[in-house]
Image: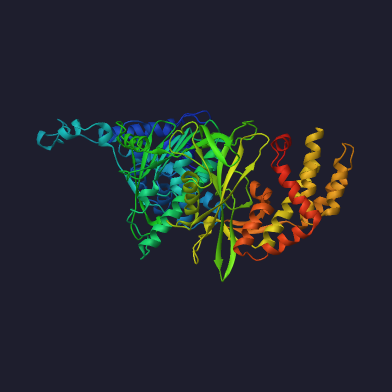
Amino acid sequence: MANRPGSELAAVLYEELAVCRKRGIERLDIQSHNQMRVPIPELERLAAGYSAATRSPARGRIPQLKYLLRDAIAAFREENEIDAQLVSALFFGDSLHRVTKSAGELLDIAQRQLGYNSSVRFRQTRHAAFDNFAEFLPRFVAGTSPVAAEEEEIPAGGVPEEEAEPASPPPSPIDSVLAPEVQQHVASTGYIDNGDHFVSLLSQAENITIVGYTNESLASMLRLALARKRAAMLRPDSCWSSVRVVFLSDDLLDRVNDERGYPDPGEARLLRRRLAVYGRRTVRIFLRSLPSRASWAIYDSSFFPPLIGTLFEMPDGQRIVQLLIRRPQRSSRNHLYLELDDTRGHYFSAVFDEIVDSGTDDNKLVPVGRLADGERFRTISTRYRRNVLIDGSDARDWLPMILVITWQMRGGRAEPLLQLRTQRNATRELDRFTHLAGHITQEKTAVAGLEFGLEDPLPMTIAAQRVQMETGESEPGELTPLVTGKYFHPDKEHLFFFVYACRLPDGLKLWARAEMSALSVPELLSVRENQVLRKALALCQASPLRRPARGAAFEIMAQNLILHGYSDTAGRLTEAGATRAGDLDAVAAELSDLEARTRQIWPAYEGDVEVVGLSGFQFREFFRTLLPLYESVGVAGAAEHLTLVRDDEAKRAAANRLFELYNDERVMESIPIEL
């Protein structure tokens, strides 16, 4: 402080102004585990004195400080327009009442708007502006102090009665009736733009409730906000206490009369369906990644909610409401928001609660049960979808699943269409290709003993919905029942698949976010080949120690290697795995080189991905279910490759042996790694 120009008081004020700017003027009183209430005694004294001198109705140090700074900056403009503009931008931005932007946002916006490309130069400029403003503040307050008026010369005998200043009028009856929260209630507005202000509020909130139609951009904003929250609190596990997100139900999406610039209503409805699928999926995946202590839920609203927007509940108890004003024919960036503090009666909070309470929880019920006659599923109970397929749970039940093998005719040729599982559309088996799969779910608790098979309405309805989810089409194509199949896990529930085929409509264009692509048979074989090498290498590096499991694991990988033309490597793997003293290092080195040379890079919606294989059931059933179906619909290369397998005695025997091993519950439960 000694090196700063000006008086000692100005130096103190400079430091206090700087700390206010860094914390944000609305957050000076916040106290938490890593933040203390900001001490600013000199600014408090000046603000209180100025409020008293001007008879301001402001109460409390933050309202009084804002009152002082706004008036002082306005007066400061007459002395130094440029510095006043900078100080105003750093403290208030474009707000007229409550400052909703964070200190970091205000700093970035000020630097950008004032044209400073160098952060060093900008820092020097704002330091100089604060120096000058700190010198100005005491003079400004002194000029309005009652002391200044008392020191004016008063004629002997006092002020004549007719020249005396009239007394202040009594408060308006209306003012005295209105509650304090109504008197001081001021709203701010703005454009959605890039959502940075929304992200900033998310990062500061303790609890959030979001009501929207499709929420297609919400997951990315939540992800960015959580990163900011953790950086600000210096805790990598920081999180919200609760997150509630409401979507418009599928039945109501088609009734939204907001065409977004599309002249064809059908095209607009298709876009809304796709956006809703993307929004719901990405939000669910993000929320599932939160720490277990965080409470979260997704709801479907079966009626048009009375408002759309967000309720932010801050750590200090403040509740900020941001209402979204949709603008037909405009992009989401050009929508408006209206932002205000909720009143002490929490009127808006009650509306948000009512919307949530009347919604349907998206955490659907999954039937749990047993297999009946090998081809049907018998329900015993239900569990919520979030509570199944947990690694290491050792749950020994069965879960019913659907798998829809999708294909399409393009240019007179049949092409399989598979989806790449990414962090935007899946929580398990990432970076693998899959046909459309999913849980069979029920809206209500299942009746014990309920059975269903491949051609029954329940699995076929779920399968049709799964295809519709990715295509957006109300009639995405006819389902053909194929087979059922088992998938054993060593440490969680087993899966029972109901497998269907579906030819998608000719000319149907899948949007990029569906992550679906046409793959040829050679491409699929290459993907699986690399997957086999990866699994064999993983087995060498962490092979089971128990004898039965060890022998079965090495046999499974040897048979897979044979199917892809690595008979010699399969022999060396079998020989090395026969005993614990076998030389697995040499085989691992060979496999490592082969795996590196066969890696597959695939373009995805958000950049290239290194593909690690096919989804589990399809990896195991590739030669018995997928290839025969491809052959039957005329996919190029399928018949030729099946002929090669059938005509090669070693490969034919390998395929048959793998079917036996993969369907042996005792064997597959004994192997602790996925093969």
Q: Nearer the viewer, residue 2 or 315?
A: 315
* 392 versus 640 height, above or below: above
Q: Nearer the viewer, residue 496 or 420?
A: 496
The image's colour scheme reads rainbow
Residue 180: quarter of image: top left
Q: Nearer the viewer, residue 390 or 506?
A: 506
Give the mark count: 0
Q: Please say whether residue 397 is visible from this viewpoint.
A: yes
> In this view, which residue lies farthest toward the front?
373
> In this view, which residue lies farthest toward the bottom?
411
Q: Nearer the viewer, residue 573 or 373?
A: 373
Which residue is at 17% across, 33% downward? 171
Q: Is residue 73 left or right of residue 107?
A: left
x, y percentage for residue 481?
A: 54, 52
x, y percentage for residue 189?
A: 34, 49
Quadrant holding the C terminus: top right
x, y percentage for residue 547?
A: 82, 34
x, y percentage for residue 199?
A: 47, 45
Q: Please say whether residue 1 is visible from this viewpoint.
A: no
